[in-house]
Image: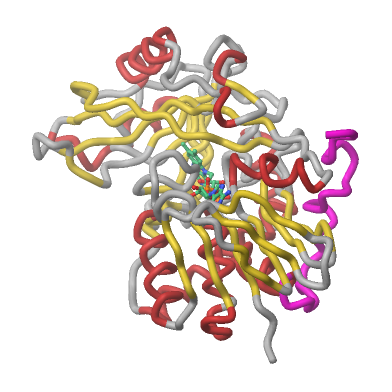
Amino acid sequence: MSPQIIIIGGGVAGLAAAYYLRHLGDRVCLFEARTVGNDEASSFGQSRMYREMYSDGYFCRMAGHANRLWQQLEHEHEVQLQRRHGLLFYGEEFDEETIEGSIPGARRVMEERAIAFEVHDAASMAKRWNLEPRPEFVGLFEPTAGAVLADRVLRLFADEIRRAGVLLFEGRAVERIDLDGSQASVHTSDGAIHRADQVVMCAGPWTNQLLRPLGFDLSLELWLMLWAHYEVAQEHADGFPQWFCFQRHRGRDGGLYYGFPVMSSAPSGRPQIKVGIDWAPAEMRALRPHDLPRAPSPYLVDLLDAFVRTQLRHVEARVDIRCSPYTMTPDIHFVVDRLHPRLSLFAGGSSHAFKFAPLLGQLLASLALEQDPGHDLSSWRATRPGMIRPNP
Ligand SMILES: Cc1cc2nc3c(=O)[nH]c(=O)nc-3n(C[C@H](O)[C@H](O)[C@H](O)COP(=O)(O)OP(=O)(O)OC[C@H]3O[C@@H](n4cnc5c(N)ncnc54)[C@H](O)[C@@H]3O)c2cc1C
């Protein structure tokens, strides 16, 4: 008899795990507290960047594996999941690593791994794109990078697992896990208790809430991240790249911004771009989800507006303001591990896990099935130094 597996969380990680376990049909059950694609979770939204342009060779290599899996998924389901429009790292060329890496670090890794890139100066960037780079800015463009169509990915995974007979319950929160018996007991918000041979936890920002009663407390910090859409001039809609801007001065915005090309329309019907600040000041950070603020600090919105006004061209009105949570680890590596013979988990997406989703799904499936994951996961172990807080 195949094992009974319960997955907690219907964000991209939990859905990907279920997708790679779907051959077990109704032996797999996924509980999602809210809805698939809900706007409180980290996976919410239309787009996420994918890239191999990493300062860390391990992430670069793993992103390459993930890209091959995205292509397999597209081929198998005859659906487009990625849009390849390139990615520009631009800004000041300083060696200090940010949560997204650095321009010199990424260049070193891409050279080592023979990944194609273009080098730009401020003039060539201003000519090619709707950017106003400062004269000292340099650019590194990875032409094979682009965007994952995130909302489409969630839909595909949810549809495919349902089709395979996996039991997907939305609006059903897991309240408690008991690992003491020969099987795990999972208590859900409808008062039921479910038995499982294996539990796969993918609860994103809510991870420690479920782990603490089990005696684990991971070093996870929640950051509430600000992003927004802006309308752009129709006649210049094609001139926006996908970009990260690195600035040495770490003010209250951390000096780090990002943006997407036009991928959708505003309610007015005009083209819109998505832009965000890739940094959370202290008042936007917390250890527990309910301690995060509900809205961004107003000065951050002003900083985002000012960046868009001064560093991009042909941008018009702001359409909306959004906030979504990052679950950060101290070293921005993920946690993909087995914490107990009956409990595996993914946590700590740290601003950049979406692009790895199919790989994470495969890794979690192999942990749940007690198979060799086929990759060196030592960088993503919960037992690496500093990842488990003592005495929860
Ligand atoms: C603004 C923003 C921009 C990002 N940009 C990028 C990018 O460009 N590229 C990239 O690769 N990554 C990016 N990321 C990171 C990536 O989106 C996340 O790492 C990833 O979505 C995390 O997915 P998850 O499934 O772990 O968590 P989540 O999406 O948060 O899912 C967790 C789910 O678990 C459910 N849940 C929680 N507790 C329970 C419970 N007790 N019972 C049942 N269900 C429960 C929640 O409701 C939620 O739906 C970005 C993240 C954000 C927020």
Is residue 91 visible in the rendered image? The answer is no
> Which quadrant holds the C terminus?
top right
Of residues 180 and 320, which is closer to you in this image? Answer: 180
Looking at this rendering, what residue extends furthest in the bottom direction?
A: 1
Q: Would residue 239 be found to the left or right of residue 280 on screen? A: left
Residue 207 position, x and y percent, is 66, 44
Asked if residue 25 is positioned above or below residue 237 in the image, the reply reads below
How many marks can you see? 0
Does 163 lie within the magenta span? no
Q: Which residues are magenta?
A: 368-392
Q: Would residue 382 be found to the left or right of residue 19 on screen? A: right
Of residues 125 and 231, which is closer to you in this image? Answer: 231
Residue 23 image-quadrant placement: bottom right
Is residue 302 visible in the rendered image? The answer is yes
Residue 134 position, x and y percent, is 45, 16
Does 378 lie within the magenta span? yes
Of residues 9 and 214, which is closer to you in this image? Answer: 214
Asked if residue 332 is positioned above or below residue 374 in the image, the reply reads above
Q: Would residue 389 be found to the left or right of residue 167 on screen? A: right
> Which quadrant holds the N terminus?
bottom right
Q: Would residue 180 be found to the left or right of residue 170 on screen? A: right
Q: Residue at x 65, y 57 (%)?
A: 201
Asked if residue 161 is positioned above or below residue 258 in the image, the reply reads below
Of residues 40 and 173, which is closer to you in this image? Answer: 173
Residue 44 position, x and y percent, is 41, 45
Q: Residue at x 38, y 68 (%)?
A: 156
Looking at this rendering, what residue extends furthest in the front direction?
A: 191
Q: Main secondary structure of the magenta part?
A: loop
Residue 321 image-quadrant placement: top left
Q: Residue at x 62, y 63 (%)?
A: 193
The image's colour scheme reads: secondary structure
